[in-house]
Image (cartoon, rainbow, N blue to C red):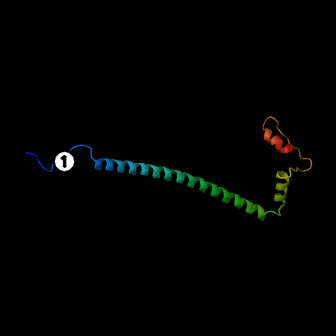
Amino acid sequence: MKRKGRRKSGFRLKHLIILFLIFWLSKTLINQSMMIKDLNSKRIKEEKEVAQLEKDIEELNEEINNKDSLTFVEKVAREDLRMVRPREIIYIDKNKDKSLFQFFRK
């Protein structure tokens, strides 16, 4: 005897739609996972940069507070103006670092 309500076995349209939905959901989840990973790495990089900038601001504020001290004046004279104390000798090793030699040569 045949059954009237017997289903056909095989590949139907709803199987194709379900397969497409599974593929689409997995692709979306993978893309979101990669995006989250990328954003987290950018956030960590930005946090490090902010911490460095805060440190620089703190150092600059400290220099502003100490601008009238003799040690600050001496530091500026040595580093920015390349001045030396009387009878002080600066030795430059030409073989060690060429960029350092060019710094003092200007």
Up-down relation of residue 51 to residue 90 (above or below): below
Q: Residue at x 24, y 43 (%)?
A: 10
Residue at 66% x, 56% y: name it: 52
Corner quadrant of residue 71 = bottom right
Q: On the rendered structure, is 42 left or right of 96?
A: left
Q: Position of residue 12 (x, y in %)?
A: 27, 46
* Position of residue 26 in the picture relative to residue 52 (left or right): left
- In this image, 6 relative to 20: left or right? left
Query: Along the line of sight, which residue is nearer the eye, 27 or 78?
Result: 27
State which quarter of the image contains the N terminus: top left
Mark 1 neighbour density, 10 Å: few (under 14) some (14–19) many (20 or more): few
Screen quadrant of the C terminus: top right
Give residue 17's position: percent from left, percent from top.
Answer: 32, 50
Q: Residue furthest top?
A: 95
Relative side of 31 to 84, left or right: left
Q: Residue at x 81, y 63 (%)?
A: 67
Secondary structure under tag 1 reads: loop
How many marks do you count on the picture?
Answer: 1
Inspect the image, locate mark 1, and give the three-letter code of the amino acid beneath it: Arg
Q: Which residue sits furthest right?
A: 86
> On the image, which quarter does residue 49 sit in?
bottom right
Residue 60 picture location, percent across and down: 74, 60
Q: Residue at x 53, y 53 (%)?
A: 39
- Residue 88 place in picture, x, y as percent: 89, 47
Q: Circle 1 sits on which residue?
A: 7
